[in-house]
């Protein structure tokens, strides 16, 4: 098969295979857009799931949907220990520019940009020299007395309110998409919840769509007790067999090629239905196939190459971030679960390693912070990366 035409290569095709099986989520967001645009109350949305299930791709699709409806839309990727002001300012600047195209009052747009600039400039620490201050690239004077108090919760409520009113002027809304939401600082999470609460009270047309690991709801709940009422939580999981087959068949058929039923069986067994793995094994199988259609033998021949790429780019890059003590903890988890995608009791990990549970808390907490494991419930721990245990057991240190 021609590798140049490989429909599983990153960026190939009009509809990424990772999006297969997400029609329900896409349809639900269509309803959100319509309800908010009509001034009706609607909760913001939080997508949760393991790595490799396609949350980021789905966020991109939801952003495109909002833009096509005339909404302003901006996307933030949260990073551990990084403040929210700077990336949020850039995202909302993009959203305001989207709205400015339809707005008939330039002075009104500039006034909101002035508020955004005032908010952004507070990203610099007090007393910072002028040369050390970040400039947000907004070519209007900063407003005074609005969204510039330095208290992120107060400022975010005021900023969101003003941006939402700008969208209301043109009869649309604003969608703010936040990836890796669990990595936001506690103060930023709290401020975000407070701002969403205020918007819901006002019926303002601004929605937040967050995406993160399975423990994100617990992070939000720990920040604000009312967060459970603010967001509609949607769990994104591996694809069903039917949807997994569609994720393979659709891009292959777009290239006027074919694949046997036995090859589909082999791809599902190798990928476990996880979109990221479907793409990895599908790409390798396409490149390995000497002729049309792709066969089960092609999948078998290609699997080691896909495994090697995943070992470096998907698993290895995360494993390398762990310290020796953290790697010991991860290895114990893998051994206790026999490499399966299952949770394990933290007390069992301690017993397996012959250590006291309290002595392992620093390693466990650091692994959670690094996004390698998560705690779905008290005393339980699991990998955030599918097949990670299998990778660890097959690794020769």
Image: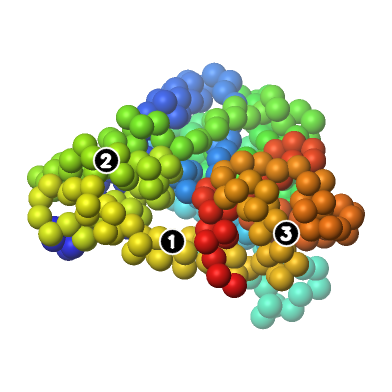
Q: In this orientation, does residue 382 appear?
A: yes
Q: SS at mark 3?
A: helix
x 27%, y 40%: residue: 264
If you read the primary sequence from the N terminus, does the residue marked by circle 2 or circle 1 appear first? Answer: 2
If you read the primary sequence from the N terminus, does the residue marked by circle 1 or circle 3 appear first? Answer: 1
Q: Which label belongs to residue 116?
A: none
Query: Could you say which quadrant of the image residue 128 lies in?
Result: bottom right
Pinpoint residue 215: horizontal percent, then vertical percent: 67, 41
Give the label, 2 or 1, closer to the camera. 2
Rounded to the nearest whole Å, what is the CA distance between mark 2 and mark 1? 20 Å
How packed mark 2 is, by other alpha carbons closer than 10 Å (few <14, some 14-19, many 20 or more), is: many
- Residue placed under numbered mark 2 in the picture: 264
Q: SS at mark 2?
A: helix
Q: Is residue 317 above or below residue 206?
A: below
Q: Which label belongs to residue 329?
A: 3
Q: Is residue 54 above or below residue 352?
A: above
x 38%, y 37%: residue: 65
Viewer-proximal residue, 75 or 144? 75
Q: Which label belongs to residue 310?
A: 1
Give the label, 1 or 3, closer to the camera. 3
Viewer-proximal residue, 195 or 257? 257
Pinpoint residue 210: horizontal percent, then vertical percent: 57, 41
If you read the primary sequence from the N terminus, does the residue marked by circle 3 or circle 2 appear first? Answer: 2
How packed mark 1 is, by other alpha carbons closer than 10 Å (few <14, some 14-19, many 20 or more), is: some
Q: In this view, does 9 lie above or below 341?
A: below
């Amino acid at each position: 098969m021609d590798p140049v035409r490989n429909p599983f290569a990153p960026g190939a095709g009009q509809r990424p295979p990772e999006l297969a099986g997400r029609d329900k989520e896409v349809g639900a967001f269509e309803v959100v857009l319509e309800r908010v645009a009509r001034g009706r109350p609607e909760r913001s949305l939080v997508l949760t799931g393991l790595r490799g299930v396609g949350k980021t791709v789905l966020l991109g699709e939801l952003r495109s949907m909002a833009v096509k409806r005339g909404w302003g839309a901006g996307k933030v990727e949260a990073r551990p220990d990084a403040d929210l002001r700077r990336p949020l300012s850039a995202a909302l600047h993009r959203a305001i520019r989207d709205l400015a195209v339809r707005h008939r009052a330039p002075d009104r747009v500039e006034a909101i940009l002035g508020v955004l600039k005032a908010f952004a400039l507070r990203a610099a620490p007090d007393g910072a020299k002028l040369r050390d201050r970040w400039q947000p690239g907004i070519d209007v004077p900063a407003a005074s007395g609005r969204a510039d108090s330095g208290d992120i919760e107060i400022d975010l409520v005021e900023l969101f309110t003003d941006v939402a009113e700008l969208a209301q002027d043109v009869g649309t809304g604003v969608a703010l998409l936040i990836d890796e939401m669990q990595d936001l600082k506690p103060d930023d999470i709290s401020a975000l919840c407070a701002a969403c609460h205020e918007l819901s009270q006002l019926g303002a047309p601004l929605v937040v769509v967050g995406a993160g690991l399975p423990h994100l709801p617990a992070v939000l709940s720990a920040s604000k007790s009312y967060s459970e009422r603010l967001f509609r939580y949607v769990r994104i999981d591996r694809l069903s067999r039917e949807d997994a087959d569609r994720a393979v068949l659709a891009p292959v058929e777009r290239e006027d090629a074919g694949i046997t039923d036995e090859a589909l069986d082999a791809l599902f067994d190798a990928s476990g239905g996880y979109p990221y793995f479907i793409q990895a094994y599908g790409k390798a199988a396409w490149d390995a196939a000497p002729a049309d259609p792709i066969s089960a033998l092609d999948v078998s021949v290609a699997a080691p190459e896909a495994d090697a790429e995943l070992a470096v780019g998907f698993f290895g890059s995360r494993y390398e971030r762990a310290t020796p003590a953290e790697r010991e903890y991860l290895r114990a988890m893998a051994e206790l679960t026999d490499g399966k995608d299952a949770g394990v009791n933290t007390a069992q990990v301690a017993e397996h390693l012959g250590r006291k549970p309290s002595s392992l808390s620093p390693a466990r907490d650091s692994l959670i912070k690094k996004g390698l494991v998560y705690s779905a419930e008290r005393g339980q721990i699991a990998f955030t990366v599918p097949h990670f245990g299998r990778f660890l057991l097959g690794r020769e240190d």
